Amino acid sequence: MNIFTYGSLMFPPVMRAVTGCEFPSRKARVKNHARFKVKGESYPGLTPLEGALTQGVLYLDVDALSVRRLDDFEGELYERTEVPAETAEGESLNAHTYVIKPCFQDRLSSDAWDPEHFERAHLLQFMANYQGFHRTDPTDPHHRK
């Protein structure tokens, strides 16, 4: 499965921390979706918005276990949905992304989220705060003790 990321997961160290894996990636964008800051947080949310364009990173061929880990990471605020993603080379690929659930729309601010600002001001602290997911299934190849 292809996963379009537009926030903290755009950064390979975050993606590796969450999934335990590295995946091929490409710069990409999705149309008719806008990225805004989540109130009181350093990360964004994505919401449908006609005419909007959001730049991000498309991870290719993400395995099912990693997708489950991403679902856990995104939590109750987001839902995974399918979108067409266009690569920087102009190729259109089906992808899944995480959008803010309609019941949580009020958690989004009206301020655009800037990935360069996040990288400069928040990425190191975000990574330091992230503890990972502890799995109890020892057959899970991503099991962490």
Image (spheres, helix red, strand yellow):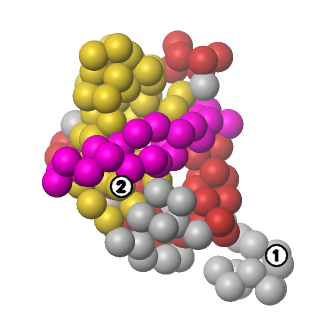
Q: Which mark is residue 58?
A: 2
- Tell me the amino acid under the disc marked 2: Leu
The answer to whether residue 138 is left or right of residue 133 is: right
Q: Quadrant of residue 51?
A: top left
- Bounds of the magenta segment: 76-98
Q: Which residue is drawn at 45% across and 24% down?
A: 47
- Tell me the amino acid under the disc marked 1: Thr
Around disc 1, counting alpha carbons within 10 Å, would you say few (fewer than 14), some (14 to 19), or many (20 or more)? few
Image height check: is 59 above or below 120? below
SS for dot 2? strand
| Tag 2–tag 1 contact (CB < 8 Å) | no
Q: Quadrant of residue 68?
A: bottom right
Image height check: is 6 above or below 89? above
Expressed as whole percent of the image width and height from the top left, the position of residue 25 reads: 32, 65
Q: Residue furthest front?
A: 91
Tell me if I can see residue 90 in this picture: yes
The answer to whether residue 112 is left or right of residue 65 is: left
Expressed as whole percent of the image width and height from the top left, the position of residue 23 reads: 41, 72
Q: Residue 144 carries which label?
A: none
Q: Which residue is drawn at 40% across and 39% down?
A: 84
Q: Residue at x 42, y 76 (%)?
A: 22
Residue 85 located within the stretch drawn in magenta: yes
- Name the one closer to the observer, 98 or 131: 98
Dividing the image into 4 quarters, which one contains the C terminus? Answer: bottom right
Q: Is the magenta stretch mostly helix, strand or loop?
A: strand
Expressed as whole percent of the image width and height from the top left, the position of residue 102 reads: 60, 18
The answer to whether residue 13 is left or right of residue 68 is: left
Whole-number angstrom distance, CA of label 2 to CA of label 1 = 30 Å
Q: Check disc 1 and report the residue beneath it.
A: 136
